[in-house]
Image (cartoon, grey):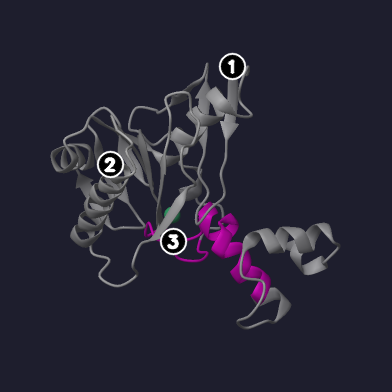
């Protein structure tokens, strides 16, 4: 299977065997900042999927299906990307578009719920009936895992922790609200607040992991952030 993860800054891909083993290293393909209208991004995703399939065939790998995870609100039953603050797209029938382009069966899932399923089957969630999977990336997401399956809620929005307003009137979020959790605890937000409080402009640190490391080393500003 070819796995694709359509994220806010990059499309990641890997060839995966049915038992979950990765047959190739995860490859990162930056999403170009220029021309980020929804049609351009959908076109880039389709081109990337077709290109990766061609490359797999050239290596002698027979790809049977495509598993696609994307950020935002995803209707997994309909195979539709309902909304994404990162891409500005609405109601994109990604599953049908990818199936038409590649001729393969396609499953479309929410990126964080897909991560939760992976943890339940292959990772830290194995053997646990109920757990939360909370990845911190550009934003903050969560999958509510019950009995090994993600709870989606009635409108495919369960676990959208990142857009819960925790600082009313705070920084503007990509979703249009102010003060969402992602504007406080998302990776770029953590870096921005550290630089602001430490009186730095530009330069290090460039990622939230560095701020976390500084905090564990006793940096008071990092601990406050
Ligand atoms: Zn938001």
Q: Position of residue 130 (x, y in %)?
A: 59, 21
Mark 3 against mark 2, which lies toward the viewer? 2
The residue that label 3 is drawn on is 173
Query: Seen in the image, is 183 located left or right of residue 92?
Result: right
Choose the circle earlier in sequence order: 1 or 3.
Answer: 1
> Which region shows up in magenta?
169-195
Q: Secondary structure at mark 1?
A: loop
Q: Is mark 3 within 8 Å of ligand 1?
A: yes
Q: Secondary structure at mark 3?
A: loop
Query: Mark 1 near mark 3, Cβ–Cβ under 8 Å?
Result: no
Rendered image quadrant of residue 103: top left
Q: CA distance from mark 3 to mark 2?
A: 41 Å
Q: CA distance from mark 1 to mark 3?
A: 33 Å
Query: Mark 2 near mark 1, Cβ–Cβ under 8 Å?
Result: no
Q: Quadrant of the C terminus?
A: bottom right
Q: In the image shown, does 163 or 139 lie closer to the viewer? A: 139
The residue located at (46%, 61%) in the rendering is 178
């Amino acid at each position: 299977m070819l796995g694709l993860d359509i994220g806010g800054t990059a499309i990641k891909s890997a060839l995966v065997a049915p038992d979950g083993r990765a047959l190739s290293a995860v490859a990162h393909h930056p999403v170009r900042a220029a021309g980020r209208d929804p049609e351009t991004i959908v076109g880039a995703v389709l081109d990337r999927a077709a290109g990766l399939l061609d490359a797999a065939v050239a290596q002698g790998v027979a790809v049977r299906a495509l598993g696609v995870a994307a950020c935002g609100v995803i209707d997994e039953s309909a195979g539709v990307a309902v909304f994404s603050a990162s891409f500005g797209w609405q109601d994109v029938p990604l599953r049908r578009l990818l199936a038409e382009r590649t001729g393969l069966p396609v499953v479309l899932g929410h990126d964080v719920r897909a991560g939760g399923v992976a943890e339940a089957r292959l990772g830290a969630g194995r053997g646990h009936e109920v757990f939360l999977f909370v990845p911190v990336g550009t934003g903050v997401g969560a999958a509510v895992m019950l009995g090994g399956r993600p709870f989606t809620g009635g409108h495919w929005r369960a676990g959208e922790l990142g857009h819960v307003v925790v600082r009313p009137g705070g920084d503007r979020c990509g979703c249009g609200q102010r003060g969402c959790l992602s504007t406080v605890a998302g990776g770029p937000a953590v870096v921005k607040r550290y630089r602001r409080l430490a009186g730095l402009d530009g330069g290090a640190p460039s990622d939230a992991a560095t701020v976390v490391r500084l905090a564990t080393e006793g940096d008071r500003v990092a601990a406050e952030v």
